[in-house]
Structures are given as C-alpha cells and as structure tokens.
Amino acid sequence: MAELSRLPVAVADVWEWQLDGACREADPRLFFHPDGERGPARRKRDAAAVAVCAGCPVIEQCRQHGLSVREPYGVWGGLTEDDREDIYRAERVAARQQRLAS
C-alpha cells in the first residue's frame, strides 16, 4: 500500500490562506517596489504596505511563507525586504556563534 503521507499536498491546502489576506483589497504595487525606488519614497510605500499587513488575519502564515521560501522582493507578513534580510543575518550570526561554541 502507498504511504500517503509522502504524497504532495493539494495546492489549495498550501495557498488557501492567501484568499483571506488583507492585501487582496489593496493595490499590489504597494507591496513591491518599482525599479530604482530609494530613500523616503521606498520607506513611505513600505510603511503603507506594513500598515495593511497589521490588520491582516493571515499575517503569520504570510510572514512564515516569506521567510521560509526567502522571498527576495516585496512586503510579506508585515516584513519588508530589509526586515527579512536582518532576520536572515541574525540567524547566520547565531548559527556561526553556535558552531564556534561547539
């Protein structure tokens, strides 16, 4: 008999949380910077996107997705690209310190 736990899950089961995202009612351009956007314009757009995320019922699922697949662009789960990079950097530092302590 086939081991069912090894079969891939239905795509709808993995992505269904997106149907409840607060971002579905917002302009997608709010969550992804245009080419060349820098400084105050980028910070303002990111802050507006994060504000949408703040009231989102699926913020944790979205954040976990962004971190687990290492989304390189956009605001995911209230985290900007820079926020995610800070988390990755802290994880690398912690892992390096743990290796050195062993």
Image (cartoon, grey):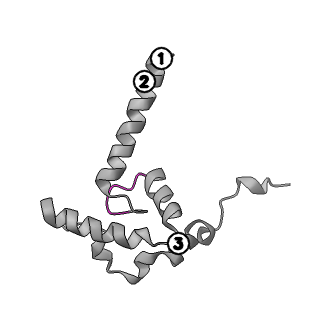
* x then y, percent, for residue 47: 28, 66
Q: CB under 8 Å between callouts 2 and 1?
A: yes
Work out which residue is located at the far right of the displayed protein and give it: 1
Marks 3/1: CA–CA distance: 40 Å
Q: Which of the two residues, 91 or 51, is positioned nearer the viewer here? A: 51
User: In this rendering, would 75 be left or right of 13?
Assistant: left
Q: CB under 8 Å between callouts 3 and 1?
A: no
Marks 2/1: CA–CA distance: 6 Å
Marks 3/2: CA–CA distance: 36 Å
* Sequence-earlier tag: 3 or 1: 3
Assign a secondary structure to mark 1: helix
* x then y, percent, for residue 11: 59, 68
Disc number for residue 101 = 1
Disc 2 target residue: 97
Disc number for residue 57 = 3
- State whether residue 84 is above or below residue 21: above
Q: Which of the two residues, 61 or 35, is positioned nearer the viewer here? A: 61
Point 51% across, 61% down: residue:
60
Identify which amino acid the numbered label 2 is placed on: Gln
Point 43% across, 57% down: residue:
66
Point 47% across, 21% down: residue:
99
- State whether residue 7 is above or below residue 101: below
* x then y, percent, for residue 93: 38, 31
User: Magenta residues, as a range?
Assistant: 70-75
* x then y, percent, for residue 42: 19, 64
